[in-house]
Amino acid sequence: EMLDRVKAAEQELRNARAELQEVSRATSAMPGAWNLTQEQKLKLEDIFEGLKEDALEKRATLINEVNMEFGLRAEEICARAATYTEYKDFESEFVREWEVSRKVQALAGLNFVRAVAECVPGGSPGAPLEDIAGFDSEELTSFCGWRVAETSADL
């Protein structure tokens, strides 16, 4: 009976995942789709230009403001800015990282990682994931998807 419930939950999760993927494709809801206000864009542009001019010291307060507003570390902001020559590319990457970072923070509160970790058998202190190291994404979904689905029911 328990095995039947697990299989049914796995199937429900696969169906839900397929629907979500279809919606994501249809709406282009990939990370990075959040919108910045004009004020936020101006701050980021100022930081980006400061990096290119090697004048970040003058913008330390602004960097700290952006850090507090978006929840991203100043080092991350500057490191990302340094890899781009065009502001629009930096902005896209920044927004993507901001969105993913905020979602990671929100998911951490729901114990998703713990739910998955509780599903992982065996391992050792030196290689805690060795028993699932060879799994492909479908095997991982089948293996612990029902546990994640249980956790997400609390949303």
Image: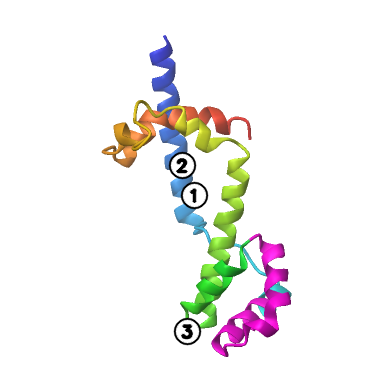
- Could you tell me if residue 40 is visible in this image? yes
Do residues under tags 2 and 3 come within 8 Å of each other at their CB atoms? Answer: no
Residue type at the position of mark 2 = Glu
Do residues under tags 1 and 2 come within 8 Å of each other at their CB atoms? Answer: yes
Residue 41 rendering spot, x and y as whole percentages: 66, 76
SS category of the residue bearing label 1:
helix
Residue type at the position of mark 3 = Thr
- Farthest front residue? 126
For residue 32, above or below residue 119: below
Q: Residue at x 61, y 53 (%)?
A: 102
Residue 87 rendering spot, x and y as whole percentages: 54, 81
Q: Nearer the viewer, mark 2 or mark 3?
A: 3
Residue 113 rendering spot, x and y as whole percentages: 51, 37
* Residue marked by disc 1: 23
* Residue marked by disc 3: 85
* Residue marked by disc 2: 19
